[in-house]
Image (cartoon, rainbow, N blue to C red):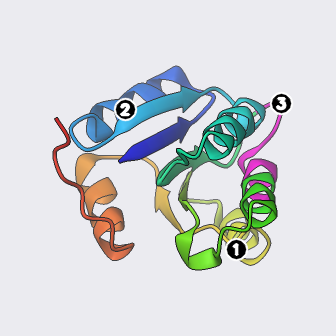
């Protein structure tokens, strides 16, 4: 599985990368703009990300805008909704209104509240029908 981890805090990226390491080949981005660049590159190369774990609140380009742009790119590429990347927003517990926007406007696949741990990630992947297998 290919996974893109997007968070402006290096500590959060490292935690997510460590959790996902046995299950996915992970790339990391420090903000939404960098994430959209990587997402576009891999989509154009025919190797799209299966999973994106993205923070909502980030400088330069926040997760909401990046989410919308990623969905636009998939639509422009003719990717049907059922074949689009699973984009899971990672958020602080008190970001209810932001999550509602992510579902309604950006069609995010799901969300996980911080603090993040392996159990939360694996439960969410299971809920989304993504069967994490050790890839190495």
Q: From the image, state whether disc 1 or disc 2 is nearer to you.
A: 2
Instruction: Decide which of 132, 121 is in the foreground and name it.
Output: 132
Q: Position of residue 58 (x, y in %)?
A: 72, 36
Whichever of labels 2 and 3 marks the residue nearer the N terminus, that label is 2
The residue identified by callout 1 is 100
Asked which secondary structure carries label 3, the reply is loop
Q: Position of residue 75 (x, y in %)?
A: 77, 66
Label disc, if present, on residue 60 of the rendered structure: 3
Relative side of 52 to 108, left or right: left
Give the class, few, some or many, for how many residues have Cα within 10 Å of label 2's Cα (few <14, many ≥20). Answer: many
The residues tagged by marks 3 and 1 sit, at their Cα atoms, a distance apart of 22 Å
Q: Secondary structure at mark 1?
A: helix
Of circles 3 and 1, which is in front?
3
Residue 1, numbered circle: none
Q: Which residues are magenta?
A: 59-68
Quadrant where the C terminus sits is top left
Read off the residue under disc 2: 17
Residue at 42% across, 43% down: 2
Count the marks: how many? 3
Asked whether the residues under the numbered discs 2 and 3 touch, taking CB atoms below 8 Å apart as contact, a structural biologist would say no
Residue lying at 47% horizontally and 53% vertically, measured from the top left: 51
Label 1: few (<14), some (14–19) or many (≥20) C-alpha neighbours in 10 Å: few
Q: Residue furthest top?
A: 10
Q: Residues within 10 Å of mark 3 (few under 14, many from 20)?
A: few
Q: Secondary structure at mark 2?
A: helix
Q: Where in the figure is residue 117, as x and y percent of width and height?
A: 30, 46
Residue at 80% x, 53% y: name it: 69
Q: 13 and 1: which one is in front?
A: 1
């Amino acid at each position: 599985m290919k996974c893109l981890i997007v968070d402006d805090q290096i500590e959060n990226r490292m935690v997510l990368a460590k959790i996902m390491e046995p299950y996915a080949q992970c790339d990391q981005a420090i903000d939404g703009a960098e994430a959209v660049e990587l997402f576009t590159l891999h989509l154009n190369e025919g190797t799209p990300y299966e999973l994106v774990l993205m923070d909502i609140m980030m400088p330069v380009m926040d997760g909401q805008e990046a989410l919308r742009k990623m969905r636009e790119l998939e639509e422009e590429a003719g990717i049907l909704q059922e074949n689009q990347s699973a984009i899971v927003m990672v958020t602080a517990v008190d970001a209810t209104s932001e999550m509602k926007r992510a579902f309604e406007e950006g069609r995010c696949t799901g969300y996980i509240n911080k603090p993040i741990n392996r159990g939360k990630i694996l439960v969410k992947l299971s809920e989304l029908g993504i069967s994490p297998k050790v890839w190495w």
